[in-house]
Structure formats: C-alpha cells, structure tokens
Image (cartoon, rainbow, N blue to C red):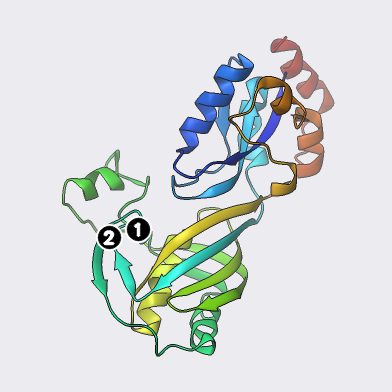
Amino acid sequence: MNGIIVADKPAGWTSHDAVAKVKRTLGAKKVGHLGTLDPLATGVLPLVINNATPFARLLEGGTKVYEAVMTLGVETDTYDAAGKTVSSMDASMLKEADVRAALAGFVGAIMQVPPMYSAIKRGGVPLYKLARAGRSVEREAREVTISALEVTGFSPPAAGFKVWCSKGTYVRSICHDAGQVLGCGASLAGLRRVGSGVFSIDESVDPRLQAEALMARFIPLEEALRRAGAGAGQGQTERMSAAGR
C-alpha cells in the first residue's frame, strides 16, 4: 500500500490531524502530507502513504489553486479570521472595480513577506511561537508567482477570488497586502484549496471516513509519479514497493 490519498481537509483540523487520522484508519506505517493547510482552510491535502513518502519532493510541486473570501475593512494579527482584530473601518465605499484593480497588482512574480503567524522558522523557532510570545521579527520577503487571480464575488464587506499560485504563497498575505493597497485593511475569511499540482478536489475524500472509502480513492505511487512526470526509474519504484510489503 504505497501511494497517495487526496484528503479533503475539514475546517478546524490541522494538516497533522488529517495525517494522524488516516494513519490510524489504514494502519499505515508512515503517512506524510504535501503542503500544509492552515486550520481555517479546507480542501486538497495530498497524503503520501508508506513508501510513497520518500517521493514527496517529486510530488509536491506544481500550481496550487485556491478559492478565497476576504473581509474588507478588518485587519487581524494573523491576517485571517482566526486572529485578533487590530483595526477596522467602513469599507462600503469600495467598488468591485477597486478590488479587481488591487488584486491585479499581485499577478506575476512578486516578493511576499510571510505573516508572523506562520510555520517559517527563525533560529529554529517557528514564527508563530514568537508571535504568541508577543515578539515580532523582521521577515525576509520571498519570491512567489501568482499565475492568475480573478474576483469571483463581491458583496461588501466580503470579496471572493480564485488564485493560481506557486508553492509557498500565503493567500492570507495577499488579503492583507490588498487591504493595504485599498487603504481599508483586509483579512482572509475563508479558504479552500481545490488543486495542488497534479491532484484535484474532484478526487479527494473526507479523511474521517472508514478505510474502505479511503482506499476507493487510493492513487498508486506509480500512477502519481507518472502524472507528475517525476521520471523515477521503474526498478527504483519496484524496490520501494517491495520494501513496503
């Protein structure tokens, strides 16, 4: 049993919660995940099972696709609805065209500063732990690529958008930075990942289901590698599969 199960992570769960649940349900020796999702977020969380885990780096690339909703006029310390409000103002004067113009400025290769409440480490310590201790440190901007971004709904103070982006992009930061451009502040209200590289929401399964339902959506390692064009040699894959038997 070496392969991938695309979990549809429930809201409120950490990525580790999904890993632990599926590992227990399947009685698997090893389970890992490709690309962390915040507890607030739902959607595509590919899980690598048993001897698929060494291939994680080969399988986690590709464009990530998110459906998001941001709240205009509300800024929080975490950049999302889970945090404490640090500023608020009336954003009713904004038009959909204003939001479209602000978001359009983030398309392409951009430098993005990660939020303090993130798992990025400084001196071996995750930034979110420093933030919880009341500390704020300088974060280096990192280059990410936004391939496309479109507004999908506008009903102030909510604005929906869909984004196609590279690994490592913080959609929370897009909301926060858009709020700065608009001059009213903004934060992420909801997030759903509908695509992660070669894996999509259409093939996902609720990780809370029983083993039979999980295995009905099981993707063998060889199939996942073929999709990703990883080019792992057949002999290597066979050896890894044999080792997991």
The Cα–Cα distance between marks 1 and 2, rounded to whole angstroms, is 9 Å
Q: Position of residue 107 (x, y in %)?
A: 57, 75
Residue drawn 47% across the image and 32% down it = 16
Q: Secondary structure at mark 1?
A: loop
- Image quarter hosting the C terminus: top right
Image height of 189 relative to 220, above or below = below
Q: Count numbered badges in the picture.
A: 2
Quarter assignment of residue 114: bottom left
* Residue 85 as seen in the image, left or right of residue 21: left
Residue drawn 65% across the image and 56% down it = 63
Specify whether residue 81 is in view.
Answer: yes
Task: Compare residues 38 and 64 and report the one nearer the observer.
Answer: 38
Q: Residues within 10 Å of mark 1 (few under 14, many from 20)?
A: some
Task: Compare residues 120 and 38 and report the one nearer the observer.
Answer: 38
* Residue 103 as seen in the image, left or right of residue 194: left
- In the rendered structure, are the residues bearing label 1 and label 2 in contact, judged by CB atoms less than 8 Å apart? no
Quarter assignment of residue 209: top right
Task: Compare residues 49 and 68 and report the one nearer the observer.
Answer: 68
Q: Which residue is mark 1?
A: 115
Residue drawn 43% across the image and 88% down it = 94
Q: Secondary structure at mark 2?
A: loop
Residue drawn 55% across the image and 18% down it = 24
Q: Amino acid at mark 2?
A: Asp
- Image quarter hosting the N terminus: top right
Q: Which residue is mark 2?
A: 77
Task: Compare residues 135 and 151 and report the one nearer the observer.
Answer: 151
* Residue 112 as seen in the image, left or right of residue 230: left
Q: Position of residue 13 (x, y in %)?
A: 46, 38
